[in-house]
Image: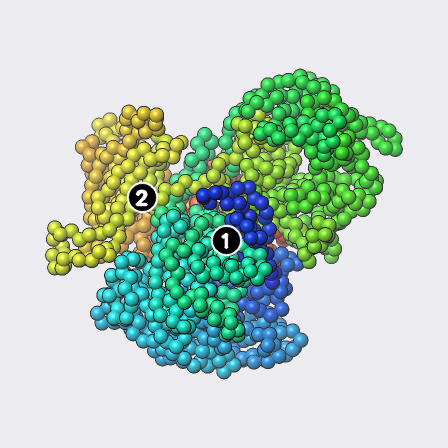
Amino acid sequence: MQAYTEIAPPTAVSHAITLPFLSSRSNNLIVAKNSLLQVFELKSTVTEVASGGEGEADNAAANFDTEAADVPLQRIENTAKLVLVGEFPLAGTVISLARVKALNTKSRAEALLVAFRDAKLSLVEWDPETYNLHTISIHYYENPDVPGLAPWDAELKDTYNFLTADPSSRCAALKFGTHNLAILPFRQRDLAEDEYDSDNEAAQEGKAERANGANGDDAVKTPYSSSFVLPLTNLDPTLTHPVHLAFLHEYREPTFGVISSSKATAASLLTHRKDILTYTVFTLDLEQKASTTLLSVPGLPYDLTQVVPLPHPIGGALLVGSNEIIHVDQAGKTNGVAVNELAKACTSFALSDQADLALRLEGCTLELLSQDTGDVMIVLNDGSIFILTFSLDGRNVSAMTIQPVPADNGGNILKTRASCSTNLGRGRLFIGSEDGESVLMGWTSTSNQLRRKQSNTAQSGDDEDMSDVEEEEVDDLDDDLYNDTATTVKKITAAAAEPTAPGTYTFRVHDVLPSIAPIRDTVLHPGKDTESLTKGEIMLSTGRGAAGAITALNRELHPTMLAQTELPSSNGVWAVHAKKQAPAGIVADFGQDAEANASSDVDYDQYLVVSKAWEDGTESTVVYEVHGNELSETEKGDFERDEGLTLSVGVLARGTKVVQVLRSEVRTYDSELGMEQIIPMEDEETGNELNIINASFADPYLLIQREDSSVKIYKATGDGEVEDVEATGLSGTEWLSASLFQSSSFTEVFAFLLTPEGGLRIFAMSQLEKPSYVAEALGFLPPLLTMDYMPKRSSAKATITEILAADLGDATSRSPHLIVRTSNDDLVIYKAIHSPSRSSSDLWTHNLRWVKLSQQHVPRYMEDGAQEEAADEPGFESTLLALDNINGYSTVIQRGRSPAFILKESSSAPRVIGLSGNPVKSLTRFHTSSCQRGFAYLDSTDTLRISQLPPSTHYGHLGWAARRMPMDAEVHALAYHPSGLYVIGTGQPEEYTLDPNDTFHYELPKEETSFKPKVEHGIIKVMDEKTWTVIDTHVLDPQEVILCIKTLNLEVSETTHQRKDVIAVGTAIVLGEDLATKGNIRIFEVITVVPEPDHPETNKRLKLIVKDEVKGTVSAISDLGTQGFLIMAQGQKSMVRGLKEDGTLLPVAFMDMQCYVTTLKTLPNTGMLLMGDAYKGAWFTGYTEEPYKMMLFGRSKHHLECITADFLPFEEQLHIIVADADMNLQVLQFDPDHPKSMGGTRLLQKSTFHTGHFPSTMHLLQSRLHMPTASEFTTSTTSSLPLHQILCTSQSGTLALITPLSESSYRRLSGLATHLQQFLDSPCGLNGKAFRAADVMEGGWDAGTQRAMLDGGLLMRWGELGEQRRREGLGKVGW
């Protein structure tokens, strides 16, 4: 019984598409990251161009991008940024995205069609009222009764399935299985009254169709008609081996082109099956479910893989192969270009020769740049950018030319291959990648044709941006052009008549989506210290090719410590910067001295105010002057230091007045701390003195909350006086929490107040007579909070102790959020939306709604009673504080025993990240010359720490503090040595040349080609953990690649039995598929040498002590036993070896495997060993040292494909978790007492869990958590057993934990999971339970009692429920 919980979401972008999704005038980017769907909008920042370069000055304007937004014609650059609207985890694996112009959508925009791996289609739209996806329909075709599916056909997971949509949204086609096509027609506006629904029972439609179409009600119609499955062999009997298909532009009926053949293509059969592909164009009759063949082009090269349709003026389609690109127009005329020397050998098709380019088109991505010229951008497998341009003869293509983009023009800004691309219009492209970071890039053109277009447009009176060439709407890229006027056709055709000149296009990066995918190897540093920024709790080798990097992850935020000072008995700190006042007689706004405030250090903090409570009960305040990071106590001014405790300090009157809030009064000072005003706190009716419990600043307003739960508001006038503001709407009411909110997006100041009944009141400072917004149901914590929301029958309210409204975001984008803190320190985050949208003249609270955001942060709970008592002392209360500029972030900090930051990047959701270290008494922003935009905090040890956020670190995309360190090469293996070194296995590509002295290939002719294949040459690099510089390099033999690196504690002396930490490197020497592979095992020790001058970190080197060549690859290494031996997988053997003093490895025991060993794992101090075979399952073995012997205990089924595996001990039971090639987790158990285990020789199958991500590594961790078990109440023998978890990583960039559960915990959590599945929305209408379940138990033998692994991701969505549903769920499971 286990739970699988993703602790970091996928980051590899697999699919992307552009469409107006949020509204009819929006321009949105939809990104699919395997099982995560994200919706973005674009924000354009206008920056001035620096002379002679592309440097950016300060932002001059910023506006959300809409189709109608035009940038004034001036010498500027537009930089587009991605702003996340929402993200939605999916219970499925996305394989394609398509845009559809559906009828009557809620947002009046287009709909999104999502295809999934198991032959499902979901049609979704945006619901602006709920700020969420709304599923219109779901269609599934995995039914075995679907026509065209034969019992002997390959399974869906083993076939290439994809979705393509008609550019005019008349239908979409899902290719699934071997050669089946599911056609989903869509109703058109001009056909809205034509009811041509087809009766087809083959494909089972979703609930929406049955509800709206099955009862014959014509009043409500679905935007689609009944779908049907059309086997491709019905179109043409020769379409038995389809390669790819796509719908084409410029046809009045849905028309698609198919690349196919009647035989399977293979490079090994090139002499017999040369040019066997055929390109055929079919037009569909949706009413008759029939098709017509329009044209057929036979004799095409065997290596064509993709159909890329092109709009007017080019038209037709591009057929992309590995060695050539061919264009086929609507009449069937072809033009092709060969891009390397191999094209001549693999095809006889007529091609123009550009073999000197020496391109490799495998895995390339094509995207249309300009519809005017028809130019196409090509992104190669290594990230290089090329431009495909056309020459037209009239309206026919006469030639094609491929041009490289020089590095000076941005041709090398992409580091690796693209998985998808989409044109965002206005000279912007999004390039998604599964191998590295995804990039939003912009392009400009200097061609004469585009200059003429700009000049003509300028003369017509339109103000358009010179740098944004594409001023056409995004929809124009996909619309049919057959209705265009002749004038437009003539203009566009003339623009594309000549090929674009080389060097025309320039590319630059606008924005980046960070990624840690794919994860190749992992190093763990549990409980690490914080002295090194480059050392994280988890170190990952990520990326492929030149995008390779090392990423350091920290679950908590470890700030960069600049200085620290002991401040005994302190419980509050406030940094203050005050501006000079204008001299007498000079009129200035709020009395500012403009000349004095023009100095460069005007924004730096000048004072640090510290509140202290001594042990004898006395209270005082100390003022320090700030000089960089140095503090010096000062008696300057009239600041009150002895009379009571300071509760808060802030500034008003545009920073010219310093305000000190004491328990019973408020005092104001000038910038030199001279006394100006004393405001006592008295009851207006009785005149009794009232104590202050809280204060909130929002210049020029000050809100005071008093001990009788009343609220007073003060305002700084133009002359700097702080006066009482009459607020009749606030008087006579008790308020549980109160704070002021001032956003960067509007000028009005609002007061957010919480009633004792859990109601929310929002007052505008300009209208304090009555609240501008009332939401009585905040205490129920509903998923969507509106003014009229009220549960029908419920008294279940959460105990809310504090609310705070604040902007969250970074310098690019900030938006209002409401943070709610409950009595147990849980944080609930609401995002402000407006539905319907408000006009700029309306008050901000007009049509205001609040959407609850999902967040997985769990507050820190202390089990130590002494710490609990200390946490209840004054100064340790959990309170919320909004800070506007901490290293560019607008953030909220939670102080107290569970300190945390709420951080958000523009392209991410808000994440709650804990602050490492002790509980925090107080925190303030701190901005000086030595600590730019930092913060200072006082912890429970009375230590003041002046800190900054770590540089070059992302927080929002993973919910971890992630710092990426580029390596510019793929990192295959990674290991850490205790001396402070990282040993990295990487490589560099080099051309492979046949060795003239090769005796194995004497029959080969002399090599004459200049287009040679590339192979990798392995390199070992040694990095210093503190400076992250390469201090040593070892180049391996030619054609030798690194497979694994491990740090082992081996016995290096047979006489003294000395043990030493050494580095073991396993490699493979790949000579070709016709020769046996060899490998090497290398053992290095770390030695100390004389460092280079001024580089003390270079005092260590690797010394090679063993190099042993073996038959087969060395694919896995691990330590074993208690005598300092190692076990290595060499070929089809797993061999135990010991290191001798003469530099040799002595074999002492072995076990034969079958195919290829992928993993070797040992259970420490037990002699138990787990070996995984890539094709023949998992082997559970044992090892003894007296005598040396290996024995097989049990094994899985033979056909299990083991990618990685590890042990999971729990409660005196031993489970084995195996990750297979179908993205499943197989839970096996070794139980020799079970009758079906045949004495333990068969591993029992306990459950199977589908993750949806291809696995990469597993690591057994010893958890710091403690899980109560039933056995603890009857015996204490098991209470000391540590809890273990498994950390799983994947190619998609996910991190997940597998946690074992006790019987009682499993039952309750399983009940909660069932409750959550019932009440939580499932995006795209998918079945989460079916997604996690596997069809076949392939790992071990059925034990009869199988319990499914719980989906921890579903359980972590517990906070999305309202309080009523939560209590219902807890009641069902007995909590």
**Foreground residue among 1154 and 136:** 136
Which numbered dot is residue 467? 1
x and y percentages locating residue 520 in the rendered image: 37, 47
x and y percentages locating residue 124 in the rendered image: 56, 64
Amino acid tagged 2: Thr
Residue, disc 2: 986
Amino acid tagged 1: Ser
x and y percentages locating residue 653 in the rendered image: 72, 33
**5 above or below 481?**
above
**Foreground residue among 1183 and 188:** 188
Residue drawn at x 55%, y 41% is 58
**205 above or below 1194?**
below
Visible residue check, residue 96: no
- Neighbours of disc 1 within 10 Å: few (<14), some (14-19), many (20+): many
Nearer to us: label 2 or label 1: 1
**Foreground residue among 575 and 777:** 575
Visible residue check, residue 624: yes
Point out the tag, 2 or 1, that comes first from the N-terminus.
Answer: 1
SS at mark 2? strand
x and y percentages locating residue 864 in the rendered image: 57, 31
Residue drawn at x 28%, y 25% is 1090
Question: On the image, which quarter does residue 1060 sit in?
Answer: top left
SS at mark 1? loop
* Left or right of residue 1134: residue 37: right
* Left or right of residue 400: residue 592: right
Residue drawn at x 55%, y 73% is 186
